[in-house]
Image: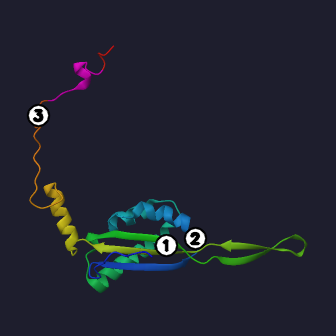
Amino acid sequence: MRKRGKRNPYTEVYARSQHIRMSAHKARRVIDQIRGRSYEEALMILELMPYRACYPIFKLIYSAAANGTHNMGFDEASLVISKAEVNEGTAMKRVKPQARGRSYLIKRPTCHITIVLRDLSVDEEYIKQSKYMILGSKKPGLIKKNKNTNLTHHDTYSSGGLWDKK
């Protein structure tokens, strides 16, 4: 059994497209490039990629963002693709006639694509994480200071230290 993490329905919006006439493997090749990126950056990447899978994924991301702005009032500039998955769908079965009255079965694969966008301006967890990342520690209150603050420039190649060894 697969456990799912708790989601905040007020910070995420999704769009799903089913029975897309394309192999799941080919769609995953494109989805892996845009997972975790911002909304605007993902659209630019999809416009420039030369794969056939880009157009349905482009439309799906655009639709998810439209759902977020219309239904939830999210700002498109703060949307990030938090989850993008491609699942295999049913295979369409077609029959191709062969010689001597025989037939050959052709399976045309389909896939289901789900895109989840998260609004970072509303998400409290992101604000907490970014605050801790700025401090440079995992817990609040623990600020590490670097003891080695040597400001002199040391060039390995000009000192001969790397090439002098015999």
* Secondary element at image label 2: loop
Reading the image, the residue beneath label 3 is 150
Graded by Cα atoms within 10 Å as few (under 14), some (14 to 19) or many (20 or more), the crowding at tag 3 reads few
Q: Which residue is painted at 17% across and 67% down in the image? A: 128
CB under 8 Å between discs 1 and 2: yes
Badge 3 or badge 2: first in the primary sequence: 2
> Mark 1 to mark 2: distance in Å?
10 Å
> Mark 1 to mark 3: distance in Å?
54 Å
Graded by Cα atoms within 10 Å as few (under 14), some (14 to 19) or many (20 or more), the crowding at tag 2 reads some
In the picture as drawn, the residue positioned furthest to the top comes out as: 166
Q: Amino acid at mark 2?
A: Met
Camera-nearest residue between 126 and 15: 126
Q: Amino acid at mark 1?
A: Pro
Badge 1 or badge 3: first in the primary sequence: 1
Asked if residue 92 is positioned above or below residue 126 in the image, the reply reads below
**Range covered by the magenta-colored residues:** 153-162
Q: Mark 1 against mark 3, which lies toward the viewer?
A: 3
Reading the image, the residue beneath label 1 is 56
| Image x and y of residue 85, in percent | 45, 70
Q: Which residue is painted at 31% across and 84% down in the image? A: 70
Examine the image and state in which quarter residue 163 appears: top left
Q: Is residue 3 left or right of residue 28?
A: left
Reading the image, the residue beneath label 2 is 22
Quarter occupied by the N terminus: bottom left
